Structures are given as C-alpha cells and as structure tokens.
Image (cartoon, rainbow, N blue to C red):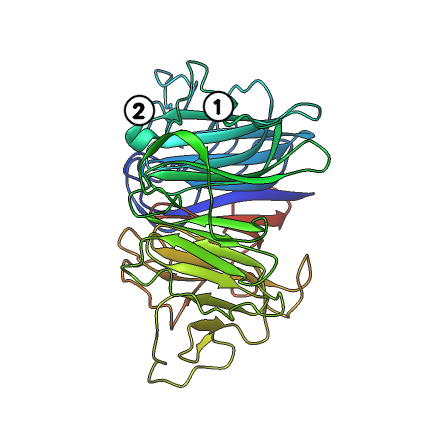
Amino acid sequence: MPTLHLLAAGSNATNQLALAPPHPPNEDAHTLTPASFLGTPPGELPEGTTRVLDIRAGAGHTLALLERAGGTEVWACGDAARGQLGNIDIDAEGAGAQFRPLALAGTPTHIAAAWATSYVVLSDDSAGDVVLAFGADDFGLLGGAGPDGTVSLAHLALPPLRVTALAAGPHHVVLSAHTLTVPKEEVLIGWGAARHGQLGAPPAPSTAPRILALPTPTPAAGLALGAQHTVLLTPSAPALVGVGANRAHQLDIPADLGEGGQLLGAGATWRTTYAWTRDGVWGTGARAPLPRTPSPGQPTDQGDGWVRFPGRRIERVACGSEHVLVLLHADGETGGGGETEVWAWGWNEHGTLGVGHTRDVDARAPVGVWREGGGERGRAVGVWAGCGTSWVAVERDGPGALG
C-alpha cells in the first residue's frame, strides 16, 4: 500500500513548516524535510489521507487541505498570534509546531492565506457556499466577518453561490463563483487593499466584499494574486488578463499569449506573472538567454520569457512569494505515467528551494529539487509554494521514512 508524505523547506521562524524531529524548532530548513501531523508518525500524513488537495501559506502560518476518510479536512500550523489558526487550542503543548485539524461545521473545498489571515470555503450540496475568514484584519482582510468568522455577502444581493476558485495575496483576496440559479451567473468578488487597482476600479480599499468589474469578457478559468496585482486566466482571448501595479512589469503580458487555448494555468509571485503550457512556463519581464550551452535534458530559456523542459510534460506549477516550483513527468506522460521531477528557481534566502544552500536561482537556469530516478525514494505527486516556503507531496511504496 503506497504511503503519502509531505516534505517542506524554507522559512520556519514560527514553525510554519511543522517539521518533524530531530529538526530543531523555529529553524529554517535548507533541504526538503518531513512535516509532522498531530497523532501521526513523523513524516507521514494522518491515517486515511488519500491526497493533499492544497497548501496555502502566509507570512508565518500554513493551511493544508487534505482528502481523508471519504471527506476533506483543513489542518494548520505555525504562528497563531493573530488568530490565523482559527479554533486550534494554542495553549496545547506543541500547538503550532505540528499540523493540527480545524473543527469546521461543514465540508471545506477551498483554502487561502494572506499575510496573517486565513480563509476556508465550506460547501453544501443544496445551499450556497460559506466563506470563513480568521486572523488579522489589516487592510480589511476579514471582509467584515462576524463573530463566527463568516464573511457576509448579503449586501451584494446575489443568489446562493458556489465558489470555484479562491486566492489571496499578502493584502487582498479574490474569489470566483457562480450562482446556483439556472442559468447560472459568473461573478468575481474581492476585498482588501486596492490602491494599485488590484481589485479593479475604484482603487480604494474595500473592507466589505464587492463585485469586481475586471477587464475580462468571460468567466475566469484561473486566478492568481501577487502582492499588488491580480491575474485572470480566461477561456478566450485575451487568455491572460492582469490588473494592479506594473512597476515590475508584471502586467506586460503579450496580447497573443496563449493563442489557440494552449495555456493550462496562471500564477503569480509578489512581482511577477506566470502562465504555462504542457511543456513550458512563461513569465513577465524580458530575459536574455544565458551565455551557456544547456546540458542534455536541462531546462532551456530562449530569451522569449519561456522556460522550456525538453522531453517532459508539466503537471503542476506552484508560485510562492518570489520563487516557483514545477512538477513534471520525465518521459512526457502526465496523470500517472513516467518518473517525476521537481525543478525550481527564485529567491532562496531561507533555503526555500530545498537544494541545500541559500543562493538565489535564476529563472534562466532552474535547479532540480526532486528526481524520482535520481536517488530520492518516492514519486512526487504535488507541489505548493508559500511565503518563503516550499512543499512537495511524495508517494512511495510501503511504510517508513523517506531516505
């Protein structure tokens, strides 16, 4: 029976990586290190966990959405000083240093994390979804949530909603949803900091959720938030739409990017916009090719903003604060075929990339983080990136620690 493991690297000043002993608490991890869950052997996930659905991390805390025992659960760890761990008993021994479950009155479907604020969407088959917010209210990030944490959307006069995507930057939040009416109506809702236009017009802070009038003619197929910008992936031209700050050229998106519908996803670091196909990742900002000849099998950058992975197929891309992880299949197959690899680039001050050092890695020369056939035991099945943190889910045959 395969076992599932969660590995983490990077900033750990408030135990936001929940690293298992013997790793010292509150110390960064420069290599991928097993995370720990309450009541579970170090390095393993809670019994009955079949998938890690999502991981979202703020400045010092982390949320994990797990598929377990036929349902879904949210577990959390790290800094709880501003209430961002919700109803977890912070006075309990070791609270925050391990992932612990949140007690939720519903089925969680989406999670997100701002700087020191957490979000959970609870779904009901017959009723509209509920958005919970807990933690810091800087920039109105709680969205006017009541004592029970529920973000009220009543003032928007909308029918019951089903949330399809939820994303948070450090200081603003956006969700996409559709009504449960027939015909259904698509809507974008956001709140928080807005001075740079990251919530569209008007560029004024919104402590109460508001319907966003963003320049996209169709519903969002993907959603990503940077520090001061918002990116939408749409199913028709223009495929990628951005609003907000552009001081780092994060909105300099070619009009023909994604022509033909080949874009599969969109992402954002604090100051960069990304999109990807099955074999390459594109990012904002002009880049000249490196003065080198790539080794066979190495990712390549042709100076056009694309990082390509010859002979491989991208399964997932994760964008953190200032770094990126790419999960791919080495033989070009996706969805279960071929050996897996994880490559990364970006800011690495805290050992964020998990490669054993703290030197930054240029996007034009990504570094291999995990290679199933390169000595690591286990198959990478998921990647996530947070605020100076990186996460890799690994599946291996049989019990025991990864080696």
Residue 276 lies left or right of residue 324; in this view the side is: right
Q: CA distance from mark 1 to mark 2?
A: 27 Å
- In the structure shown, which secondary structural element does the residue marked by tag 2 occupy? loop
Residue 374 visible from this viewpoint? yes
- Amino acid under label 2? Arg
Residue 316 visible from this viewpoint? no
Mark 2 Cα within 10 Å, few/some/many (few <14, many 20+)?
A: few
Instruction: Identify residue for label 1.
Output: 155
Residue 16 lies left or right of residue 391; in this view the side is: left
Residue at 43% in and 26% down = 133
Instruction: Identify residue for label 2.
Output: 82
Q: Total of numbered circles in the picture?
A: 2
Residue 276 lies left or right of residue 92; in this view the side is: right
Residue 288 pos. (x, y %): 34, 79
- In the structure shown, which secondary structural element does the residue marked by tag 1 occupy? helix
Residue at 47% in and 57% down = 241
In the rendered image, the vertical position of residue 398 relative to residue 128, given as above or below: below
Residue 386 pos. (x, y %): 39, 46
- Amino acid under label 1? His
In the rendered image, the vertical position of residue 221 relative to residue 56, given as above or below: below
Front position in the image: 379 or 257: 257
Residue at 63% in and 32% down = 68
Residue at 43% in and 18% down = 87
Select label 1 or label 2 by which is in front.
1
